[in-house]
Image: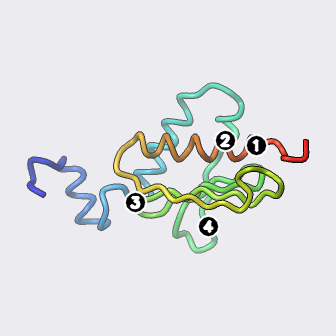
Amino acid sequence: MSDDLIKKEDLFNVIKHGNSWFNGRIKEELKKIIAEKHSAFYLSHSFRWDSDDEYYYIYDNECYLFIFEGKIEVRCDRENVFSSHQTIEYAIKNISDIEIAYERFKSMTMEADEDD
């Protein structure tokens, strides 16, 4: 990839982190996306570090959104919902990938039980 096809900031991040979408950058963009929404649902999501300080995550209603280097993983540990025990990985190449992953996480947390 030539230097004129990649922003200098992204090139620096690739050199420093091995990926232009590193944990901190994904987290900051996701915080902006969440902050733009004004409902209580969006405001209830806060970031935590895992026990080894390797990645950020959000937990809500037995669902997780994990931020790893260059990707977001959403996981549903709930029973009796459409997304039961699903794990979906999103490679992050731009901001819209972050928005899509967060919307999927949000939909998992809001699913009604299939028994209802």
| Earlier-in-chain disc, 3 versus 1 | 3
| Earlier-in-chain disc, 3 versus 2 | 3
Mark 2: amino acid: Ser
Disc 4 + disc 3, Cβ < 8 Å: no
| Earlier-in-chain disc, 4 versus 1 | 4
- Picture coordinates of residue 111 (x, y %)? 76, 43
Question: How much space separates mark 3 and mark 1, taking CA atoms?
Answer: 27 Å
Mark 3 Cα-neighbour bin, 10 Å: few <14, some 14–19, many ≥20? some
Question: How much space separates mark 4 and mark 3, taking CA atoms?
Answer: 17 Å
Asked if residue 86 lies left or right of residue 77, the reply is left
Viewer-nearest of discs 2 and 4 = 2
Viewer-nearest of discs 3 and 2 = 2
Most foreground residue, 87 or 22: 87
Viewer-nearest of discs 3 and 1 = 1
Above or below residue 109? Residue 32 is: above
The residue that mark 1 highlights is 111
Q: Which type of secondary structure does the marked residue at label 2 adopt? A: helix
Question: How much space separates mark 2 and mark 4, taking CA atoms?
Answer: 23 Å
Most foreground residue, 116 or 17: 116
Mark 2 Cα-neighbour bin, 10 Å: few <14, some 14–19, many ≥20? few
Q: Quadrant of residue 51?
A: bottom right
The residue that mark 3 highlights is 70
Q: Residue 50, which numbered label?
A: 4
Above or below residue 103? Residue 53 is: below
Residue at horizontal 84%, vertical 47%? 114
The residue that mark 2 highlights is 107
Residue at horizontal 45%, vertical 59%? 71
